[in-house]
Image (tube, rainbow, N blue to C red):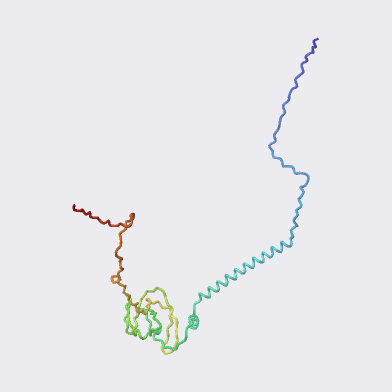
Amino acid sequence: MVLMEDAVDMPSSNHKRKSITINTEAQPSKKPKSPAKSRRSILKKPNKSFDENSTADEDVEINGDINRSTETKFNESSQSTRILSRPRTLEDIAQKETLNEENVSSTFNLEDLSDSEEFWIMDIPRLINPQELCGQTIVFDDKAKFKIKDERYCIASRNINHHVTCIFNSKKGTPQYKTVNVKPVGFLTVRRKLSGAPEVKPVSTESTSVQFPSNLKTRHPLLGVIRERKRRSKKFKAC
């Protein structure tokens, strides 16, 4: 038996194309309606009064440090001005240099200075009396040598280019002194010559000769002591 079915052509369904539109305009993001829940922290809430007090203390400390720095700078500047202050009177000079007062008549006065003469300052040891320098000859180019009471001295000169403050007696009769700035030609320095060290003669090495040992054997660096071989003479017996 053969079964046959009627073949019916089913109409093909038309596929429609789907179109997609792209919007290039930026749209604001939509905020979620539900508010964000804040997380609870374990830490305690900060105390506002404590923060205000701490900031106030810090401001006070900073102000205190600034005041201290200004005070130290002021003290340093005042100390520097005190150190740089120069004596203005004879009492200030005597107090600064710890000088002792001595009633001695001055040998050189302010009236003895003149612009037509050269002015030199001499530095001498305390052991020399200035009166003993009278009659001595000084050579400015080279070291001058002289002798006082069996002691030998030498004078060295050097030029200077600055002023020197000196104290002179203004009047010969009365002890009235005055400070004057003078520009000397140079300085003269007097120094005592020390006695020379005794001359030490070197020991002559000719007399002190080293004894050289005798009967030494010659040694070879590799073979050692070389012994001299004795020649043996052969004796022939007569028959």
- Nearer to me, 118 or 140: 140
Q: Residue furthest top?
A: 1
Q: Position of residue 237 (x, y in %)?
A: 20, 53
Question: Is the residue 177 above or below the residue 203 in the image?
Answer: below
* Residue 140 visible in the shown view: no
- Nearer to me, 193 or 56: 193
Q: Position of residue 37 (x, y in %)?
A: 77, 48
Residue 49: which quarter of the image?
A: bottom right
Residue 158: which quarter of the image?
A: bottom left
- Horizontal relation, residue 86 to residue 186: left or right: right
Q: Residue furthest left?
A: 239
Q: Residue furthest bottom?
A: 173
- Horizontal relation, residue 13 to residue 95: left or right: right
Q: Quadrant of the N terminus?
A: top right
Question: Is the residue 8 above or below the residue 238 in the image?
Answer: above
Question: Is the residue 143 above or below the residue 21 in the image?
Answer: below
Q: How many marks?
A: 0
Residue plotted at (45% across, 81% down): 179
- Nearer to me, 179 or 209: 209
Q: Position of residue 5 (x, y in %)?
A: 79, 13
Q: Position of residue 169 (x, y in %)?
A: 42, 85
Residue 194: which quarter of the image?
A: bottom left
* Residue 29 visible in the shown view: yes
Q: Residue furthest front?
A: 239
Residue plotted at (41% across, 74% down): 162
